[in-house]
Image (cartoon, rainbow, N blue to C red):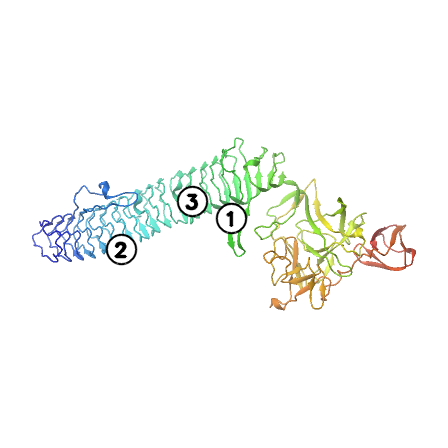
Amino acid sequence: MIGCKYAYCPKLTTISLPSTLTTIGSNCFRGTGLTSITLTEGITTLEYGTFADSKLTSIKLPKSLTQIISRSDSYNAGNLPNEYYNFQKSVYISSNQSGAFHNCKELESINVNGAVLTALGTYTFNECDKLRSIDLSSTKLEEIPAYAFYSCDSLRTVTFPATVKSIGQGAFYYNQSLESLKMPAVLTSIYGDAFRECKKIRSVDLSATSLTKISSWFSNVDSLRIVKLPNTVTEIGESAFYGAPIEEINFPTSLTTIGSSAFYNNRLKNIDLSATKLTTINNWFANNNTLRTVKLPETVTTLGDGAFSNCYITEINFPSGLTSISRNALNYCQIDTLRLPATVTEIGNNAFNYAKFDCVEIPSTVTKINSGAFYNAEIRGSLHITPNASLVWGDGGNTPFYCSGSEYINDENGSYNRYYHLPDVYWNSAAEFPRDKFGQIDNLYLPIDGAISDNNNIGYIFYNGMTKRIDIAYVNENRKYSFSVDKEMKTQMINYRKQFSRTSGYGEAAGWTTLVLPFDVKEISYERDSYNEKDTVALAPFGSAALETAGTLPFWLYELGTDGKYKAATEIKAHQAYLICMPNNEKYPSENNISGYVNFTTADATNGVTLKPTAKALKRSKGTKFDLVPTYDGIMQHDTVYVLNESNQHYTDEKTYPAGSVFIKNYTESYSNNPAVYPFQAYLVTNEGKTSVASAPMFYSIGGGDGTITGIEDVPFATPDKATKAYSRNGVLYINTDADRTINIYDVTGRTVRIIEAREGVNEVHGLDSGIYLLEGQKVAVGR
């Protein structure tokens, strides 16, 4: 044996060893200037610190070598002095390390040369900064001891012998270049921090081993992406993959336990636990914003606190035996339909807060809903609750179903806050609806004998599927402006209220507007305000039989025919586009003028009126040169959109078009960031210039000024200064006029049926069919 007489001799650069040598003693060549050495056959043992801190660049081990030992055999894995390591943060390496090749900064290669090694000591190669690879496959090692390769910054590959059963504490800790690991089949144990902070390991295949527990060997390995576990694993320990952003891992059927923070900061997209026997899911996978799908085993009964907190899960199965969903278990999830099994009894605090759903169904088995259970969750469709007779609500905290909030959006429409609240709530019980447990609701559905103490901030309440009244209106939904009916609903009355104030034409088209409604209109009425005393006046389109009812006033209603011309309509049908004009001109008799709010109504107190979904319900009117397009959405200004000038005159070189008379291409009367066409209105799209938008006409006139449309400008009203009195007796129309004049007689369609050259005094008109006639601003019924 050679002792330590050469230790710390920096000028010692070469040495020849005797052929009879069997052991090189502790610290023998420590701190020398040796760059290479030939170890003679026959050497069986290298004691601790043999070449530590030397200048060795390479070494070839003799085949006779059986052991490289450390200072003490008691320094084995899992039984190291506390000063050598710290489990939580970092390893403290003693200044008196005793590994045979400790701190050999220049050592680049080790040729094992078939050595029959059976034992390595702790710290054997730690801090060998230039060592790039080592092949131990020909050895008989059963253990890679603690810190054997600690902080070997350049070590990329290690080939283990098939005999290795254990890898010691921190064996490869802080190896910054280690890229791949192939574990031997007989491996049964790996001790803590074995591969901690190995920054380049991307995959670990343990599937051939017989490991039963996975501990924190790979914590903070921030390059790790793929892990394959053996079927023998029963436990994944605390912080096992803490800080390791793994993307793929299998969960074997033998798995029964997972420790806290085992997968903290992982990047798993899919988790399949269905083959395991887990009964409780704790917060192992929390705070993973890439996780989308989860498969749970049927053995799970509890989703524990924070089980999938802050995970944007889109798909998860709920086992048939699930009973409890705990605090923050599924907040921020994004599940289309949340249908809880009929075994769940409790929903924990904030269990689903900030989550997103299309539909939520809560069964009658739930006996407790805690505070904030769905706080600020967005339920886009419907919430169905069948409350248990023993249902209790958690104390304090946030309102369980305050499903209102906002989301910051930055898209092609700009940056804005999108606001949301509950659209439809079904309370399937005669028990009083607990208003204080809910936020804003559009539609609340109660049974026929349902009860509610406060209807504040509820749009409509439906009893047995029917509400008393619905007033149609569009909403400014994040500057998008829209109206929609997502599901069929019934009401005793439905109403749309619109203000008319534009001046209508006299002998020309003016004052027209467009209209489209989601229901068939049965009644139209005008709210006439006379010195603040309001009365209601019935209205009907020209040509309508309703004009035969005394006191009913006419207005113009037109639709687009397939011949490309507008034709008179006598009723307003659902989802159809119309042109509508209310008489309002100083040249008309004042009693015929309509300026104010008009209500379009349908009512059925017994059977109700059905309001059907609006999706794909709108009916475009197709013409020859253009189509009339109804809309329930805000339409922005565009080259393909022709907008009616409802509020302002339109000037051209040839003519000035009054408000409400012409559809203009790429036109708007609003601010540029507001729609040019609003819900319940219509616009034109051209059928001309299909190959080029620019080649299409700049406008289409309603009144025919451009020669495309004719007939609407006919006006069946006379000037107020022509004083006449008309009445009928026995089928004869009598006209009493104060002067000679020409008088047009119109039927209720606005068609001229007779032109009379009246003389001053009483004039008789014979041969008229029974019906309603209009002349000089008056309406007369002629009968037999």
Count up the numbered dots. Answer: 3
Q: CA distance from mark 3 to mark 1?
A: 29 Å
Whole-angstrom CA distance, mark 1 to mark 2, is 47 Å
Q: Residue 41, how many percent across, how many down?
A: 11, 54
Pick the front one: 445 or 413: 413
Of badges 2 and 3, nearer the viewer stands 2
* Pick the front one: 50 or 117: 50
Crowd tier of the residue under label 2, counting other residues whose Cα lies within 10 Å: few below 14, some 14–19, many 20 or above:
some
Q: Secondary structure at mark 1?
A: strand
Q: How far across and how far down the image is residue 62, in percent? A: 14, 54
Residue 764 at x, y = what percent? 91, 55
Q: Please tell me whether mark 3 sits on a helix, a strand or a loop.
A: strand
Answer left or right for 473 relative to 315: right
Question: Few, some or many C-alpha atoms within 10 Å of disc 3 (few <14, some 14-19, many ≥20)?
Answer: some
Res. 393 visible in picture: yes
Q: Name the residue that disc number 2 marks.
A: 156
**Residue labelled with disc 1:** 407
The nearer-to-camera label among 3 and 1 is 1
2 or 3: tag closer to the N-terminus: 2
Q: Would residue 756 be seen by someone viewing this image from the given angle?
A: no
Tell me the kind of residue under disc 3: Lys
Callout 2 secondary element:
loop
Residue placed under numbered mark 3 in the picture: 295
